[in-house]
Each structure stands twice: as C-alpha cells, then as structure tokens.
Amino acid sequence: MLLLEHLWIILALPLAGAAINGLCGKRWPKSAVNSVAIGSVSLAFLAAAETVREFSHLAAAQIPYVKSYFTWIVAGPFKVDFALQVDQLTVVMLLTVSFVGMLIHIYSTGYMAHEGGYYRFFSYLNLFKFFMLTLVLAANLIVMFVGWEGVGLCSYLLIGFWFLKKSAADAGKKAFITTRIGDFGFTVGVLLVFWTFGSVNFGDIFKSVSGMPAESMAQMGILTVICLLLFTGAVGKSAQLPLYVWLPDAMEGPTPVSALIHAATMVTAGVYMVARMHPLFSRAPIAMLVVAIVGALTAFYSATIGLVQTDIKKVLAYSTVSQLGYMFLACGVGAYGAGIFHLMTHAFFKGLLFLAAGSVIHAMGGEQDMRQMGGLRKKIPFTYWTMFIATLAIAGIPGFAGFFSKDQILEAVQSGPHANPLLWLLGVVGAALTSFYMFRLVFLTFFGAPRYDEHKVHVHESPVNMTVPLMILAFLSIFGGWFAAPKLVGGVDHFTKFLDPVFSSYALPGAEVAAEVPAEAAATPATELLHALTGVPVIVGILGLLLAWWFYIKNPETPKRLAQKARGLHALLLNKYYVDEIYAALIVRPLLWLSTNVFWHAVDEGVIDAAVNGTASVARASGGQVRKLQSGNARSYAAWIIIGAVGFTVLLLGLLGVVR
Amino acid sequence: MFSEFIDRRAPGRYYISALNMDSSYLDIYAPLLLMFILAAGLAGVLVAASTLVGRHKHTREKDQPYECGITPTGDARAPFSVHFYLVALIFILFDIEAIFLYPWALVYHELKVFGFVEMMLYIMILLVGYIFLWKKGALDWS
Amino acid sequence: MIPLPAEQLLNLHRVAPEVVLCVFGIVIMVVDPFVQAAGRRALGWLAFIGALTALASVHLAAHFPGRAYSDLVNVDRFSIFVHVVVIGAASLAILGSLDYLEGEGLQRGEYYALVLFATAGMGILAGANELVTAFIGLEMSSISSYVLAGFRRRALPSNEASVKYFLLGSFATAFFLYGIAMVYGATGTTLISGIQTFLVSLPPSQHLPALAILGLGLIFVGLGFKVVVAPFQAYAPDVYEGAPTPVTALLASAPKVATFALMLRVFYVSFGSAQHLWFWVIWISAVLTMFIGNLGALMQTNVKRMLGYSSIAHAGYILVAFAASTDLGIAAALFYLSAYVLMKVGAFLVVTHLGQQGERRLAVADYAGLGMKQPVLAACFSLFLFSLLGLPVTGGFLGKFFAFQSALDAKIVWLVVIAGINSVIGAYYYLRVIIAMYFWEPSQDYTPTPVAPALSAALLVAAAGTLYLGLLPTRVLVLAKAAADSLSLLSLR
C-alpha cells in the first residue's frame, strides 16, 4: 500500500520534470531534456499503474480511498484539506491520462525535434500533466479547481507556443478568456456548493445530498442552479455550445499539444467533472436536460461544420467538439458510465488521429490543407493504416473501440431512463456526419492523385519514436472498447460493471431499479449480437463511409458542384455559422465601444466635462478668475467628488426616511 | 477656570454631552440665519436692480482696470519670487508655535514637569525643522 | 480632572511604531543637510532600518492591547494587523526607492523622511479611536504624499500629479472634516466607540439622527477619496502615473490599507446600527468602482497607468467584502488587503526597474519579449499580474475568493455576480502585458540592465509573500479573523 499512501508521488513526478526542464533545460542537450521529460511521465505512469494494482486489493468499504495530506485553508467553517482520492472513476481517468500522455510525450520528441524552445515545450507539457493529474485525483472541489485552472493555464501557454505568430498568440488569448467565462460560473458554483452543503469535500457533499429528500432539494431549486453553474465551467473547458469557439483556434498550437490537451485529456475535464458530481446532477432533472440538450446540439452542430473544413487539424478539432458533445449527451441522460467509456476510447482514437495528422503534416513539410494532399497512402503507409483504424473507430464501425462506446451512449438515449427520441435523432444524424467527414478526410489525404508539387515536397515517413506511439494507440483504438464486448453476446459489460460502484452508491432512491435496463427475456445471445450489429448507429456509420466514398473517390467533382448549388449553406458551414463574427459583433465590439464611447467619451468627456463646462459658463458670467487657478481637468475631478458627495448623502438621507 | 467646560461624569472627555443639550438648541441661531438671508438678499437686490435699471455703455476706456486715471502699464499679475511664499510659510509655522505657548503658559502650573517636557519636545521638533531650513538654504536670499 | 501625566507618558509603548517612525524621520531630516551627496544613500538604509524597527515595535505594542491617551488611540489585534501590513509595504517601497533615486539623481534625505512620516500617519489612522486623531493621521500621510508625488521636480507629469493630488486631496479632506463636525453635532462625541454607544442607546422607536447620517455620508467622501473608490477615483490614474514609480507603489498600497481600516472602524463600529443605510452606498460605490477601474484599464497602453486603474478596480473588490458586513467579511477584506499590498507593490517595483532612467519605458510595447531577456523578472511580474487577475495559488485568488464568499454568505448575490463579470474583464488587460512579455518580438532598442540587489530583495519578498498567501493562507487568515473579531462587531448584533 505504499503508493496508495503516497498518492502525491504521482503528482510530484511530472512537476519535478517540469521544474528541472524549465530551470536547467535551456543549457542542456536535447537528449537530457528528453530523458527528464519522458522519464518523469513514464515513472508517473508506472506509479499510477502500481496505485491501481494496490487499489484493486481494497475492500469495497474502503472505496473511495481518500488521503488527506495537510490542512490547506481554514477560515471559520470553511476548511479545505489538500486531499487526494482514488475510486473506480479516478482509476479510469488516471490510467488514460498518464498512459496516453506518456505516448504523446514520446511522440513529441520526434515531432518537436527541429523546433526552438524544446525544453520550454516539455516543461509546459510536464506541468500540464501535473495539473491534469491533480484535477483527476482531487478529493474536493478546491483542489480540483487548482487543477482545473492549471490545465487552462498550460493550455494557454502551449497554444501560444509559437508565440511569434500573431494568430497563435491570439488563439491562446482567446482560449484563456473564453474558458475563463466558464470558469467564473464554475467558481460561483463551488461557492454555492459550500454555501449549501457546508463543505467542499466530495464525500461530504454527496453524503448530505443523498441524505436530503429529493423533493425538498428540487423545490429549493438551488441544486439546479449549482449544477447549471458547474456545467457552465464544463461548457467552457470542454468546448461546448456556445463557448466552443476557442477549440478550433487552439489548433494553432503544436500538434502533440492538440492531441494531448485538446483531444485526449484537458477538454474531457468537463465531462469528468459532471460525472464526478453526478449525485448532484442526478437530483437536478432540469440541469440534466440542459446538459443533454447542449451535448446533443453540439454533437450535431459541430459535425456539420466539420463537413466542409479543409484544414486537416480543423476537421479534427470540430470532430473533438462533436465527440465531447456525445459524452455530455451520455451524462445528460444519466449514462455516466457510457460517457466515461466514450471519454476513454475517444482519448485513444482521437489522440491517434491527431498524432497521425501530425505525422502527415510532418511528412508534407508543414502543409495542413487537405486540398494540397492526396495519394499519400503509398508513401506513408504506416501513418495511413493507423489513421484508417482510428477513422473506423470514430465512425463506429463494429469491432472498433468507438463502436462500443458510441453505441452505449445512443442506446441510453434511446431506451434509458431519460430516453429522448429527439436527442437520439440528433445523435444518430451526428454519427452519420461524423463518419462522412472522417472518411472524407482519409480519402482526401491518402487517396486519389497527389495534388502537391512532388518535386518540392519530399514526403517521408516519420521516425520511429513517432510511429511507435501511433501503433500502440492503433492497437488501443481497436481493442480499447472490448471491455464491453461480452455484452453483445448477452454477457457482462465489464467497463460499466467496474464503474458501477461509483455511479450507484449515491443514486436516487428508487432510481436503481430504473437504471438497470431489464434484459429482454426472449433475447438469445445470437439475436442480441445481430441486433447490435444492425443497429441504426452502425448503419448510419457505414452510410457515411459510402457517401464519402461516392463523393470523393467515385465522383470527385460532386462536392464542388454541390457547393456551387447550395452556395449559401456551404458558405455558412465554411464560415462556421459566422459564430466568431457574431461574438465579435455582439460581445467584443460592444464592450470596447462601451469602454471607449460611454465611459471615456460620453461619461468622462460628455457628462462630466459638459456638466463642468455648464457650470463653468455660469461661473464665467460672474467673472471666474478662480477658474484660472485650477489646472486642466482637476475641476472635472472635483465635480466627480461633488456629484458623489451629493448623490450619496441624498441616498443616505432618503433611505433614512424610507427605511425606518 | 475652564473647569465648567468639563463634563465631570466622564473623565477625559472635554465636551458637553449632546445628551444634555436641549434638543432645539439650534433654534437660538434662527435669528442669525434670518439676518444672513436678509443681508445677502438686500445686497443681491441692490446689485441686481442697478444692473437691470441702469444704462450700460461699454467703451474701451471704461472696461480698463482702474489705475488712478493713468493708462495701465504691464501685467498686474507679476510673478513674485518663490522666496516670498517660502518665508510666508515659515512665518506661519513659527507663528503658530508661538501661539501655542500662550495656553501652555496658562496651565503651566497644573501640568508641572510633564508640561515642561512636552513643550520642550515640541520646540525641539520645530527647532530641528528650523535647522533643516537653514541648512537647506531656505533663508538664503542671494 | 486632567489625567495624570505620568500615566500618559507610560502609554508611549502603545504608539511605539509611530514614535519610532517619527524619530527616524526627524533624525534623517536633520542629518541630511550635513552629509555629502555620496553618503545620502546611507540615509535610505537608515530609513529602512527605521521601518524594520517600527515593525519590531509593533510587536512590542501588541503586548499591550488597550486604549491610550484618553481613549484616542486603540491597540487591538485589528490595529496590529494593519500596522504590520502598512509598515511592511513602506519597507518594500523604501527598498525599491534606493536605486531608483540614485538613477534619477534625486537621492535626498527628505524623501525617506517623508515616507516615514507618511507611514506614521497611516499608523495613526490604523489605531485611531477618535475621529480628530484619525484626521491628523490622514493629514500626516496625505501631506507627505503630496510632496512625494511631485518629487521628480523637473518632470511635468510629476508636478501635475502633485498639484492635482494636493488640490483634490484637500477638497476631499474638507468633506471628511465637515462630516466629523456633523457627527459631533449629532452625537456629542468624536470617539468612535462613543458614537457607537450613543447610536445604540437610542430608544428603538426613535430613528437615527439625520445629522449623524449626513456626517457619515461626508466622511465616506473623504475616506473614499483616499481609498480610491468611485466616484472619487478620478485623480488616481493621473497621480499614479505622474508620481515617481516607487512612490506610486507606496501610494497605491499602504494608504489604502490604513484608510480602509479606519473606514471599517467608522462604518462597522460607530455606525454599525446604520448598516441598512450605508450598505447601499457601499454597494453602488463598489459597482461603479469595479466598472470604472476595469473598463478604464482596458484601453490603456501605458503599463503604469493601467496598474493605476487596476488599483481602482481592486478597491471595488474590497468593497464587496465590505458590503458583506460580517466578521468574515472584515477578515476577507483584511486578507485581501494584505495580498493586494504584496502584489501591487511588487508590480510597481517591476515597473520601477523597467521604466529606466526618466521613466521612459512604460508602454506595453516596451515589455515585448521580456520573457526572453530577463526571464526571472518577467516571471515575477507575471506572478504579480496573475495574482492581480486572481488566478489560483496566488494570494490574489484567495483574496477574491474569500471576499466573494463572504458576500455570498451575506446573500449579496448580485454584487458578486457583477464582481465576477469584472474579474473576467480584468483578465484582458493583465494578460495583454503577459502576452507582450512572452509572445511578442523582443524590442531591439532595449538592453536589459541588472536588477539592483535592494530591489531584487524587495521583489523576492513580494513574490514569496504572494505565493505564501496563495498556498498557505491559513495563518494570515486566522490573524485576519482575530483582527476582525477584535472590532467587536458581534457585540452589536
């Protein structure tokens, strides 16, 4: 029980790596930086694995295993420990984050080999790992919040890694500010949680919320408010409607960063948080519905944008937004296990897609536009095959990881306790679109004739430290979902069963029965399998594939003609529904305008100066020599003071009269 | 001699408690206020009346500042040497010091040694200021 | 009768910090004309030692809680807390001034003497239990500040700052004095605790005297000017921009703390029973202050001025804790103030160094690429900015957190929402500087100059303090809570 006692070691390792590389890396050769970075994250993964091994020996009563290291903040009734915890949900996240993170670290040594600021990159990446693991291991909302803000900061630093490029610096800023809007909601949510439950520890909160009768909480409505505020944080962090705008821009960062932070780990923090807080969400049906609706809408909406993007990374970015939408949809209908399952498989295949895309970009010498690619299949077979596997996985083709998880989500939306046909329809259409745009990506990139100048671009396969992670992730993209495979033949879904203790221990009384979908008595293993394989999600997945094939291989001219015909729609999609422009017009510009015109020109110059000038003209009539004694604006400042004095005293006396 | 101003029920507080005051004690000032209003009103009416009734004819000569019938020469607001202000300030400072000595002298016997030490400290502090001024050349006219 | 002189003399230990500061100030003033120009730097160190001695004497005073000089002065945990913060800020400012004055050719004893006198005035403010005493403290600190603001005599902005500060400052002080007169007229006392007694002992049927409430409004004008809350904030950006930067560091931090302390005493203790009235004044002022501060800062390209606006915004956040009107709110305000002092002084001291001779380099563009050229300095500055912005693990974050939490506890939800919106707006202008430092092409015309040891030490203390408050706030928070309790607000409710 060594590591379980000392969970902090898992956090300390990447932090130490970040510190060492950050402080000394500048003077060290790349090999030294590599060994520090990779060494620390590998050790962190091993520590995580050992922790999980020790965890598996714990008795059910000992779970969640909470370990408090020291009392961090005490303010009257407000007490926060620096406490970490492990339960089944943590285990899944811990392994996913530390393992995928390690692979991406290894990949980065190849990808970033020719970049400046090598040590800085790895230092940031390690720091990110530290914060992400803090977020996952946190045993209370405050520690979680530290991780939450920390990953945001690292994301910002890494998006703007190529800071000399203005677009990269702007994208970093956009990501930071957009997510901060969400974080504000999250902060207020945390405050409200403390206010309501008198504690920020998960255990205490869940205990008191499950002790309260469901009716009284609902009547208070406070739970709904809390959940919606927390969800606002998740919307920002996990790039959901309407705060998703930063994620596509975040692609300005180096590709490994996109893979690690903006696909596999950080952006899923919102989903994790919602799943973690499920005892609250389960008791706030309105909030649940909002989560589900936002998730489904985002899943559908960003899939449509993905249809027409030409930048290979942008397609993947919108795809990530869309897949995160599925995870929230799952949480919103109460299928938290399915959401986390999809989170994990998504980490595998989306991480792989990004890394493979990085490999393509690397091979093409920095080109990201798919219109300038084509026919790469033969030249970089390795990248091609791994990417193809990942595409099959995300499209939900049976046998691949994404099939199991996505199927579970859609099934829950269709027939679970919170089933909703409309959301299901959105999800299914989204799945078809997903399949279409992903195969479109593959076909445009790897098939057809080369559309680049073959004399100028020397396409080459990536080095081995980039391809090995691809292979491992490809393996996981196939088999990572097979935990659930026995279910197809009437057996047990091991993943859901594993997580079950987490999600059922604080379930609503009476809801447990409903949560378990009664197995159809007549179903035999064979019909069950047949049913799953011919389910609607699978059919639409294959439909998308065929459609993409027809569009981009059979009749390559069709897309152009179609774009000509439906010019308006095409432009709308290509410009991402003009959301950036709308935000600029509705929020950014009015704020600047307010600042410039109202507060500066109108209030300061208009009202104050005018008032003063008005007074001054009266004063001038009576021969105001005094005026000359005062310099420039000082008199308008004095006017402020007078206005304030009069205003406040009148207010006070007025209140005195009114408020007896 | 000033003991009647001291509220003996609350040692150390040199005021007459407002609680003991007649609640309408401000009333005695009402005639004063009335007089102020009357005076200001009368002055205002006189000035206003003469402005309204009288004839106004502006000529260049009439609008010039009055300087004993001679055409004004130069700007009336000639800059003074900053030293004048400095000396004025210093004068006020030490003038106030001197004024402080009067009440002190009055109660000197009651305060005994304490009063002596206090005043010496006070004078010393001002003396330090004086030395500072002197050395900084504030009294230098050259 | 007149209290025994001997008894009064013995009370010197209760005002030990002020005595120490004044004695050191006077000594520096006397010695100054007699030393050569080269030796004046030593006077700065003498002042620093004076400030440290004063800090030590706070410790002495802390052993003798109670009142002194016919209840004019109060030594309690509250005044001790504020004393430490104020004198600490002054010490940091002195450290930061040493090399700045050298570079500007302004090394003079008066400067340090004035800083010490100003600090003594703030100490009086912190401990005053009587309004006229408080007024003397206010004037001591103000008049010294007016001179300090204009200390760069050959620079026009500095002159402008001084004159504006003086004119408007005396204007606002007049309101304060007038307010005191009104309150005295209504209650017959100027003792802070005496006013409380008077107002509380009124029969319940009788409502509060209008004259006293009018006085309270006027007192708010005078004190609001000093802590820079809207609508009395207008002078601040000009003054902060024009004053020599180390002076700005002092002006933007210590007087605010001391005056807030007095404000807490007057509002909570004296006028605790009028809380339902002044609550709305604080509320409105908080909203205005936050918006004006943040939106004003949004458009600035001059870092010094931007930080000036930012300190207005922060006064607004402190008012949020103020509005909570609970002992937790006071504790939050005190905690916020201590965090604020560290980060603000730190930020201005960085600006002091980077301004270079004549304070030429103050634009955001001048900070371009600093992350490359002087990574440690840039990291320090980023830390201060992050703290001002309110990011976790910094004192600024917890300050905001406690302030907002105490307001929520008091069910002042809307104010917290507005404050939250404002902290989002704030992110923009702080981040812009950080982006410039790390993400912009380094400017070519700037060769980094090494940070002088004294300044480095000050920065180090400020940075370490900011992190300390962010990571291990408990100790300070407990002290702040104890300080809040000693205001004995609870006895009123």
Image (spheres, coloured by chain):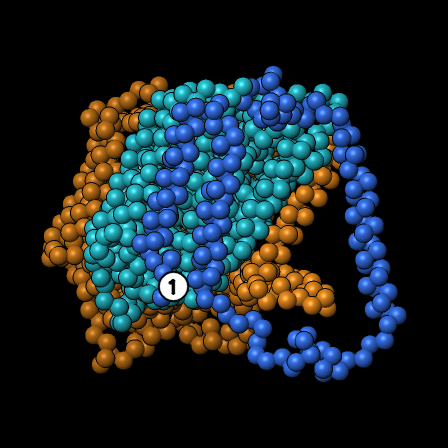
Chain colours: A orange, B blue, C cyan
Vertical placement of A71 versus A455: above or below? Answer: above
Which residue is at 28% across, 53% downward?
A: C33
Q: Position of residue A337 (x, y in %)?
A: 42, 36
Residue A444 lies, with reference to residue C462, above or below; the image says below
Helix, strand or loop for disc 1? loop
As rendered, which of C334 and A578 lies closer to the eye?
C334
Q: Residue at x 46, y 48 (%)?
A: B93
The location of residue A424, given as percent across then percent down, is 54, 47
* Mark 1 Cα-neighbour bin, 10 Å: few <14, some 14–19, many ≥20: few
| Position of residue C444 in the picture relative to residue A538 (left or right) | left
Residue pictured at 63% horizontal, 61% vertical: A608
- Residue denoted by label 1: B141
Q: Image quadrant for the N terminus of chain A? A: top left
- One can see residue A603 in this view: yes
Q: Quadrant of the C terminus of chain A?
A: top right
List x then y, in percent, for residue C270: 58, 29
**Quadrant housing residue A497:** top left
> Given the current orientation, which residue lies at the most extreme top position?
B9
- Residue type, mark 1 in image: Trp
* Residue C355 position in % (x across, y down): 32, 62
